[in-house]
Amino acid sequence: MALRTIRMQGDPVLGKVCREVKEITPKLEILIADMLETMYDACGVGLAAPQVGVLKRVVTIDVGDGPLVMINPRIVSADGEQTGGEGCLSLPGMAGQVTRPNHVIARAYDANMQEFEIEATELLARAICHEVDHLDGHMYTELVEGEIYEVSYEDDEEE
Ligand code: NI
């Protein structure tokens, strides 16, 4: 495993639409391992493949319940609303208020290409929405209500 360089906002790769993953290859397994290592090293709760320069529909998330790998994730239902501070590893030290669904059901494939469904609320629902947006070339900054502000690293949750 190796740390990968996290692309910063303004990097054109963050504005691109990612391709679906068709099969698990050794290269993809290394990507997933590297993404997890890179996310934990940066103290993030989520990371999407384009943030390390790879245009594939792969995200890693850990909101404190252990690692979650989602390949080709899609949100199949969303309801409720939560408004709160959101950050991103591609814009370190910054955050902004974003409204997201408070409850989502998502489907994805795991690292063995087995399809699964996950029901998520609160921070996990926010993280899934944030990461799926990355796969379609979108940053949370497009959704910020009001100003983007500086935050201390200690209380930041970066995706
Ligand atoms: Ni992000």
Image (cartoon, rainbow, N blue to C red):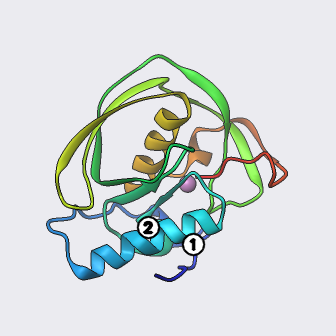
In the picture, measured across the screen, residue 87 lies left or right of residue 11, that is right
Residue at 58% x, 52% y is 159
Q: Find the distance from the CA under tag 2 to the CA under tag 1.
A: 8 Å
Q: Amino acid at mark 1?
A: Arg
Residue 13 shows in this picture = no
Q: Nearer the viewer, residue 98 or 63?
A: 63
Q: Amino acid at mark 2?
A: Pro
Residue at 65% x, 65% y is 42
Q: Which mark is residue 50?
A: 2
As displayed, is residue 24 above or below residue 137? below
Q: Residue furthest toward the top?
A: 80
How dense is the environment of label 1, judged by Cα within 10 Å: few (below 14), some, or many (20 and up)? some
Residue at 42% x, 66% y is 49
In the picture, measured across the screen, residue 66 lies left or right of residue 29, that is right
Callout 1: helix, strand or loop? loop
Is disc 2 in contact with disc 1, using a CB cutoff of under 8 Å?
yes
In the picture, measured across the screen, residue 82 lies left or right of residue 56, that is right
Residue at 24% x, 81% y is 26
Q: Residue furthest toward the front?
A: 66
Image coordinates of residue 66 in percent, x first then y, are 48, 49
Image coordinates of residue 138 in percent, x first then y, are 47, 52
Quarter of the figure with residue 110: bottom left
Q: Which mark is residue 132?
A: none
Q: Mark 1 highlights which residue?
A: 7
Callout 2: helix, strand or loop? helix
In the picture, measured across the screen, residue 11 lies left or right of residue 24, that is right
Q: Quadrant of ligand 1?
A: bottom right
Q: Nearer the N terminus, badge 2 or badge 1?
A: 1
Image coordinates of residue 3 in percent, x first then y, are 55, 80
How dense is the environment of label 2, judged by Cα within 10 Å: few (below 14), some, or many (20 and up)? many
